[in-house]
Image (cartoon, rainbow, N blue to C red):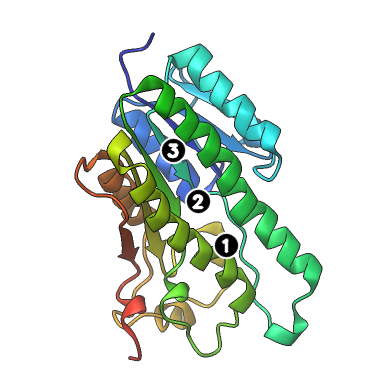
Amino acid sequence: MSLHKTVVITGASQGIGAGLVKTFLDKGYNVVGTSRRISETTAFERNDRLALIDGDVADPETAERAAQRAVERFGSIDALVNNAGIFVTKPFLDYTIDDFRRLTATNVEGFLHFTKCGVSQMLRQKSGGSVVTITSSLTDHPIAGVTASVPMITKGGLNAITKSLALEFARDNIRVNAVSPGVVDTPLHTTNPKDYLKSLSPMGTITAVQEIVDGVVYLTESANITGEVLHVDNGAHLGKW
């Protein structure tokens, strides 16, 4: 069994996910990273403390394979980061039921599959653990012109279940938290005007990927924090500016 702790990270091939992989490896963790085609990514170097699992988080078999690989190769699952997610903006009346099902499959069903596998293994180990999920500051403070009502059904639900699970597993020393970003400098915003993106928070700045990563690592390693939704959004959740 490895002497290092093991973290499972979803949506790990680029952006925040790739940043999480690199930082956790740098901190000495074993990492199991998943995404649809993560074996093809060039976002980080391979090493013997990294295992990559191709697969869709909406497929329960992906979570099962990731959990199995973590235990067989590294001996444990000590932390889980539910980072995989999709985000589609359009006026409410233009959303279709297919949009809703696609958002739910990735954002909610993916969370359920991986969290059930991760928490089940943590309970077997009887040594506690951490679950951190990436949500969105738009759940707390919608912004005029950013029409993301249907995605926020899923992200708001993740904030809610974070608090419920934190209480349910508190006596097992399994902590459940979330990081709630605003606009982050990821490939999602490559074609968006920077001045517009800066206008979406009172600080007038765009969050670097590493700031989100640091928030996740902080919650993963903070032994006395559970049920927290940590806003890393340049103040966007505060209200009108």
Question: Residue 179's spot in the image, x, y percent?
Answer: 37, 57
The residue sitting at 58% across, 55% down in the picture is: 85
Question: Residue 228's spot in the image, x, y percent?
Answer: 30, 57
Answer yes or no: do the residues labelled 3 and 1 have beta carbons within 8 Å? no
Q: Quadrant for residue 22, please give it.
A: top left
In this view, which residue lies farthest toward the left? 224
The residue sitting at 46% across, 50% down in the picture is: 16
Left or right, residue 99 beside residue 67? right
Dot 3 or dot 1: first in sequence order is 3
Q: Quadrant of the C terminus?
A: bottom left
Can residue 13 be seen in the rendering of this structure?
A: yes
Query: Which residue in the structure is indicated by mark 3?
Result: 80
Left or right, residue 224 beside residue 170? left
Q: Quadrant of the N terminus?
A: top left
Q: CA distance from mark 2 to mark 1?
A: 8 Å
Q: Disc 2 on helix, strand or loop?
A: helix
Query: Which residue in the structure is indicated by mark 2?
Result: 15
